[in-house]
Image: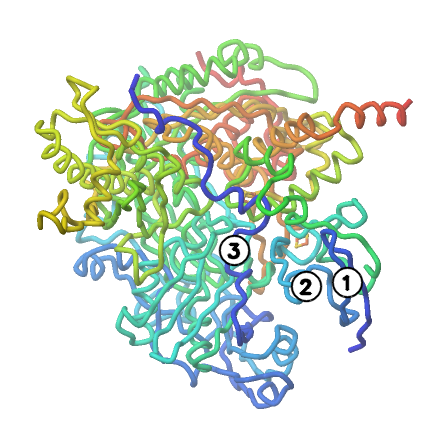
């Protein structure tokens, strides 16, 4: 296939020895001299209220307290904790209507956990004790938990900028009739032979990254504010905080820490503004802000829940004629990410099948639920649950095999991807479907389980997905990277994008070593701090390898070009006739002729003039490769998932027996890391479809903010997993790689729902499909053999 | 708040401390001794990130009051390794790519140590059962289970340990 020796191998992870012994430093592990401890006092009893009275005096007098700060003690400016607004042009920003509506400390509580004031003390206990002495009186306001409630006439307005509490809808200027798509949907539906339609509900899922959010912030004597944070987007957070606190960016420094899982929750900021506000109140002292788990649960943004309606029309021959959809999602109390998910849910829908006519409308309404923002998949899981079930309902009515139907109608090379005008450069979904079907025993099991007796029923289901590799063309895709060659011909790569634990730094280092022709061990990669590293948009949209990897590759190619140029002078052979392996540059046609890279790098740095002759030795100057890289394209990955489930029709329990994830990832730079992404994705996808949802009481208070009450799949719940990496090198991605970070989570959702349909003949329109819902469905509709539903 | 004088034997070293009676072992390890290899994930005994060994048995240090640990032998993830040399469990986690963000890892490693001490040859079902109290959100547990299997196979003195366990069972 290829001659690479480092790319494509399971090179050892760069950070795991420290992680295995616990020496890796997460934000909460940081201890600095003179450190103080911050505590944000939050509103726990109300999800919607006005602060009538706030008295900080008793807390300020509490032992060990250094300062107490409230709304009046901090900037009156508001912010938007998401960073989407920085990734689009100003005109696009205005068109989307992104707003800054979050105060550091609020006087209008919009969700449970909203920040009221902050305490800075000499110990965590002292801060806790003082928090209990804050006197705050509230005027409760009506609590709106759904879009219906918050848009009702007379509802309290969350912000004057968004009348009717409509945070976002696809803007008319870009999407005529506020709809994404094109073609005559109504006409096509009239001509359809079969129309399937339903109203769904998609759940509010929590990222549950294992490291609760923590920060340290400090103002030094030069007035520079430093924030240690595990944000996925250190550079954009730098700009956001600089703007919020009126600092030039050089006085706002971000130190990225090791990240204990992200899954979207660290996309942008969470409590960085509060941590920095506290540090500004006590210049010279570092302030640590550690979020408790139960606190993290309510304050960090979760997946957008909401109502998702869809109808799809087919011709009798199976061809799809139109798809019409509307996703009405429930924001939390603030705007962040209101535009993103409402758009992308439709974008993935548009990228999946060749619908001649498509109309997708997406809207976000403020509610008093906890915040919603980025979560791995970013709108795709919601669409997968709805679209893939309706496709299977259509297949049942058409008498079509769900695998064959998908193979026939999915989009592929040359079709528009998730964003019109950006076509798919590669697509190996057919191979994913074929290999996945073979792995699960599709044909045989589909036949076998179509007719069953007894209380325990089995089923197999399939679902497919497309995702993205970076966010081009909707969002800025820019990464700067510097590679510096040391005098001993080792390389140091500086690249601001964080590794969230997915192993991206290892894969990037593989790309660097492969490109340079240096051994893996002779390359170091670091994300540096904001004052040292160049610009990078951050780790989101599964972009780190596809975009970041391409940037690293380009910077290394530039360093290699300089190296070859100097070698060419020494060897008297044009640079394009040279190659490098293991740090030895040689003439391709005559490999015996060559020079060690070290001879060149050393002479470049230690450029002595010969005292005898007065002649310099070699070419002077340390070699550095630099690139400020803008992704030219977007090569989305595809995936097919197959699930086998067992449904207990007496208890309603669904057991997932096997899950096959077959993914077209272009090229696996580090196969073990890629598998790890797909396997971990399955655990979260299964949670979405079967067990995970944040519950609120009527007053908008979270009922299950703990690992006992919020049910994730544990080691014993996990099915047998089969991961199939389909490697069909993409023509654009570095070494053929596309993305993998988010996609593993997506199609297991539809596959499990469709397997349940196959097992008991019932589709469920509300996720997660809990035993209670299964029993209710069985009670209302009765268990049916799949064979009886199929019309043919 | 009352305080108590205690002695802890942590990773082979002796520490004499005066601790508030309401301080958890996790807080004492992290905040007073700076041993941050033991992680805080929930503070309520639900995630296993804070797992340490007390007299060889895995416990959640967030639920354990330090004052009740007087005279006890405590091992943390840093105690398994010897200045950068990983023990066989940690090495197995590295080799099997069982570590992603790594936040659950110290707890997972300690839980594995206690499992293998009791049961040097666990079945896959026994491994999964033993790990139920330790949450990982990154890996889907797939490679962690493989790592525990490998750790069992590479355990020093494995043959004798397996024999001994068989005798106990018989
Ligand atoms: S921190 Fe102790 S079990 Fe979670
Ligand atoms: S590796 Fe991230 S939680 Fe386990």
- A418 vs A390, left or right, is left
Q: Is mark 1 within 8 Å of ligand 1?
A: no
Quarter of the rendering occupied by the C terminus of chain A: top left
Please, which residue is most extreme toward the front here? A612
Q: Are marks 1 and 2 in contact (CB under 8 Å)?
A: yes
Q: Are marks 3 and 1 in contact (CB under 8 Å)?
A: no
Looking at the image, residue A74 lies above or below residue A673: below
> Image quarter for residue A671?
top left
Which marked residue is nearer to the observer: mark 2 or mark 3? 3
Q: Residue at x 39, y 29 (%)?
A: A196
Residue for badge 3: A25
Residue for badge 2: B27
Q: Residue at x 29, y 39 (%)?
A: A549
Whether residue A697 can be seen here: no
Looking at the image, residue A6 lies above or below residue A139: above
Residue for badge 1: B66
Whether residue A50 can be seen here: yes
User: Could you say where residue A471 lies in the image, as x and y percent from the top left?
Assistant: 28, 44
Secondary structure beneath dot 1 equals helix
Looking at the image, residue A268 lies above or below residue A641: below
User: Could you say where residue A679 lies in the image, as x and y percent from the top left?
Assistant: 51, 32
Q: Residues under labels 1 and 2: Cα distance?
A: 8 Å
Give the letter of the chain under mark 3.
Answer: A
User: Could you say where residue B82 lies in the image, as x and y percent from the top left?
Assistant: 63, 45
Secondary structure beneath dot 3 equals loop
Give the letter of the chain under mark 1.
Answer: B
Q: Are marks 3 and 1 on the same chain?
A: no
Give the letter of the chain under mark 2.
Answer: B
A506 or A342: nearer the viewer: A506
A77 or A143: nearer the viewer: A77
Q: Residues under labels 2 and 3: Cα distance?
A: 17 Å
Q: Are marks 2 and 3 in contact (CB under 8 Å)?
A: no
């Amino acid at each position: 296939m290829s001659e690479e020796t480092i790319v494509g191998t399971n090179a050892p992870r760069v950070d795991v020895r420290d992680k295995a012994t616990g020496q890796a430093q997460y934000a909460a592990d940081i201890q600095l001299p003179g450190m103080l401890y911050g505590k944000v006092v939050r509103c726990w009893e109300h999800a919607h209220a006005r602060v009538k009275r706030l008295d900080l005096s008793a807390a300020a007098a509490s032992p060990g307290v250094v300062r107490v700060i409230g709304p009046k003690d901090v900037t009156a400016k508001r912010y938007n904790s998401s960073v989407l607004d920085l990734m689009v042009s100003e005109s696009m920003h205005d068109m989307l209507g992104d707003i800054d509506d979050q105060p550091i400390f609020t006087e209008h509580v919009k969700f449970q956990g909203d920040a009221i004031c902050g305490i800075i003390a000499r110990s965590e206990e002292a801060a806790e004790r003082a928090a209990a002495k804050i006197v705050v009186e509230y005027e409760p306001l009506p609590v709106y938990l759904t879009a219906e409630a918050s848009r009702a006439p007379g509802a309290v307005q969350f912000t004057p900028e968004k009348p009717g509490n409509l945070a976002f809808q696809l803007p008319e200027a870009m999407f005529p009739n506020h709809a994404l798509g094109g073609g005559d949907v109504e006409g096509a539906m009239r001509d359809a032979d079969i129309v399937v339609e339903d109203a769904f509900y998609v759940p509010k899922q929590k990222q549950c990254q294992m490291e609760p959010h923590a920060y340290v912030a400090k103002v030094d004597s030069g007035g520079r504010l430093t924030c240690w944070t595990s944000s996925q987007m250190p550079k954009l957070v730098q700009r956001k905080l600089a703007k919020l606190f009126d600092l030039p960016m050089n006085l706002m420094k971000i130190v990225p820490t090791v990240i204990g899982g992200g899954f979207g929750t660290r996309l942008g900021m969470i409590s960085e503004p509060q941590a920095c506000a506290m540090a500004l109140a006590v210049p010279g002292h570092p302030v640590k802000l550690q979020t408790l788990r139960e606190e993290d649960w309510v304050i960090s943004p979760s997946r957008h829940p909401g109502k998702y309606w869809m109808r799809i029309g087919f011709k009798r021959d199976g061809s799809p004629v139109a798809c019409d959809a509307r996703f009405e999602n429930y924001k939390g109390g603030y705007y962040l990410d209101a535009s993103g998910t409402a758009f992308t849910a439709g974008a993935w829908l548009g990228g999946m099948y060749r619908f001649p006519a498509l109309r997708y409308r997406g809207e976000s309404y403020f509610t008093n639920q906890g915040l919603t923002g980025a979560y791995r998949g970013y709108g795709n899981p919601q669409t997968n649950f709805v679209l893939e079930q309706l496709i299977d309902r259509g297949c049942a009515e058409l008498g079509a095999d769900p695998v064959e139907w998908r193979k026939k109608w999915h989009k592929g090379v040359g079709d528009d991807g998730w964003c019109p005008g950006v076509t798919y450069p590669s697509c190996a979904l057919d191979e994913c479907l074929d290999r996945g079907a073979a792995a699960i025993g599709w044909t045989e099991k589909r036949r076998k389980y179509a007719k069953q007796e007894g209380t325990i029923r089995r089923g197999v289901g399939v679902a497919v997905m497309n995702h993205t590799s970076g966010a081009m063309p909707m969002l800025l895709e820019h990464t700067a990277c510097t590679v510096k060659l040391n005098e001993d011909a080792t390389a140091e790569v500086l690249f601001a994008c964080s590794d969230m634990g997915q192993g991206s730094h290892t894969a990037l280092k593989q790309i660097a070593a492969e490109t340079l022709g240096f051994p893996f061990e002779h390359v170091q990669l670091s994300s540096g701090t904001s004052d040292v590293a160049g610009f990078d948009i951050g780790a989101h949209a599964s972009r780190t390898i596809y975009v970041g990897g391409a940037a690293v590759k380009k910077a290394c190619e530039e360093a290699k070009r300089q190296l070859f140029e100097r070698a060419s002078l020494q060897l008297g052979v044009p640079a394009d006739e040279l190659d490098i392996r293991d740090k030895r540059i040689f003439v391709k046609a005559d490999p015996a002729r060559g020079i060690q890279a070290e001879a060149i790098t050393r002479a470049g740095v230690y450029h002595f003039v010969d005292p005898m002759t007065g002649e310099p030795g070699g070419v002077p100057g340390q070699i550095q490769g630099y690139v400020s890289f803008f992704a030219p394209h977007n090569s989305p990955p595809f995936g097919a998932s197959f699930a086998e489930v067992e449904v207990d029709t007496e208890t309603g329990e669904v057991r997932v027996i096997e899950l096959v994830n077959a993914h077209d990832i272009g090229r696996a730079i580090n196969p073990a890391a890629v598998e790890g992404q797909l396997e971990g994705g399955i655990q979260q996808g299964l949670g979405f479809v079967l067990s995970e949802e944040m519950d609120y009481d009527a007053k908008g208070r979270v009922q299950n903010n703990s690992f006992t009450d919020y049910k994730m799949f544990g080691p014993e719940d996990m099915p047998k997993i089969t991961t199939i990496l389909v490697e069909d090198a993409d023509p654009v991605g570095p070494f053929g790689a596309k993305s993998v970070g988010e996609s593993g989570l997506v199609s297991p959702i539809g596959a499990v729902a469709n397997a349940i349909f196959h097992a008991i003949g019932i589709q469920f329109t509300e996720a997660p499909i809990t035993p209670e819902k299964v029993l209710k469905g069985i009670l209302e509709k009765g268990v049916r053999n799949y064979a009886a539903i199929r019309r043919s | 708040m009352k305080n108590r004088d205690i002695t802890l034997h942590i990773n082979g070293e002796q520490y004499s401390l005066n601790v508030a009676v309401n301080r958890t072992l996790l807080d004492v390890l992290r905040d007073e001794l700076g041993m941050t290899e033991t992680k805080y994930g929930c503070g309520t005994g639900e995630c296993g990130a804070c797992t340490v060994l007390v007299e060889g048995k895995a416990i959640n240090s967030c639920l354990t009051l330090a004052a009740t640990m007087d005279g006890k032998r405590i091992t943390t993830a840093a105690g398994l390794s010897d200045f950068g040399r990983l023990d066989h469990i940690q090495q197995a986690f590295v080799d099997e790519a069982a570590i992603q963000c790594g936040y659950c890892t110290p707890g997972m490693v300690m839980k594995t140590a206690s499992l293998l001490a009791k049961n040097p040859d666990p079945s896959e079902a026994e491994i999964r059962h033993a790990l139920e109290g330790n949450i990982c959100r990154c890996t889907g547990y797939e490679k962690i289970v493989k790592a525990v299997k490998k750790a069992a196979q590479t355990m020093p003195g494995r043959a004798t340990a397996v024999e001994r366990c068989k005798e106990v069972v018989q």
